[in-house]
Image: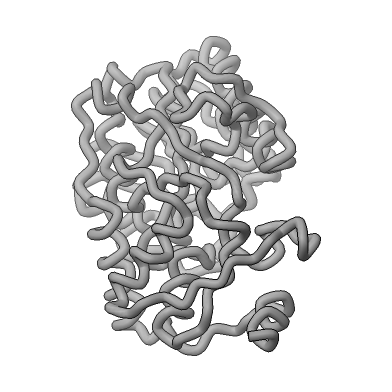
Amino acid sequence: MKKILLMGGNQFLGKKLCEFLLNKGYTVYILNRGNRINPDGAEFLKCDRNIKEDLYKTLKDITVDYIIDISAYTKEQTSLIQGVMEGKYGQYILISSASVYNNMKNIPVKETESIGANEVWGKYAEDKYLSEKITIENAEKLNFKYTIFRPFYIYGPENNLDRESYMLARIENNIPIFVPDRGEEIIQFGYVDDLCEAVNFSLGNSDFFNQIFNISGNERITIKDYVELCGNICNKKPMIQYINLEKENLKARDWFPFRNKNLIGDISKIEKTGFKNKYSLEEGLRETYLHLKKNNKLGMPILNNIEDSFYKKG
């Protein structure tokens, strides 16, 4: 039975991936600080990954086949776990981010495009880039294989980020959705189950060794059309109002869950390995909607101050 060390593992993607891998028959160790409920069946390792001495103590008797790192946000965190586990794993899978691309002029963006710090995604993108960089450097020094995934917008049931739930709750409760400018930016989503499948597909697969992959769904959609699709899922016509950012002297992220920037990627590289997404965007959103509805998570949303001011203006 193959063994996996999952860094994180108790929130959205991490939780879903942990449950997915357990169902596949893996032994899964999850390492986190224990601030949330961990999935049943996993071996819980309570530890702060930022403290070197605690990591060594917690992991001294642990040897695994794979490390899957969802909670690496800095190069220091990334390098530390790679070093502490030196010689005790074969493949390291880093969940990075499409935010590392610093030039979205050539779209859909390929894995070979320029990456690094950028003004759109700020420090988050810079830290993800540096985590990738140190992983590639350490792979040779510490003798492990790496696989880096760059997801675009991940969505699905239990998403801790208020994105699809933002849209669905407002539509369900007949609240207008205030779309930045004309909502013509193109974005790309990946369903959480498909990302879990991709990670599983990469484990021990030589096609993925020392490689970087964009991972997302097959469809690309404008923000405006995404709102309309969410309305179709709810079987309601969304009330869309467009907000002129320049006129209002605002940024999209002042109230809206997405930046008014294109974020689309070329996923042909991962498709050449034989991996295929199972969910269309509509299917994934429908699964998400049904989950939220079943668990009473589509109640009246709390509007932030900017939304509230738009709403009162009518």
Q: Quadrant of the N terminus?
A: top left
| Badge count | 0
Along the line of sight, the residue nearer the viewer: 156 or 219: 219
Q: Report the side of 167 relative to 134 (left or right).
A: left
Residue lying furthest top: 140
Q: Report the side of 216 relative to 37 (left or right).
A: left
Q: Position of residue 70 (x, y in %)?
A: 50, 45
Residue lying furthest right: 249
* Residue 28 visible at all: yes
Q: Position of residue 142 (x, y in %)?
A: 54, 16
Q: Position of residue 255 (x, y in %)?
A: 66, 67
Q: Report the side of 117 relative to 225 (left or right).
A: right
Q: Is residue 245 above or below residue 310?
A: above
| Point 47% across, 55% down: residue | 223
* Residue 61 visible at all: no
Q: Is residue 132 above or below residue 21?
A: above
| Point 62% across, 46% down: residue | 49
| Point 50% across, 89% down: residue | 300
Along the line of sight, the residue nearer the viewer: 162 or 246: 246
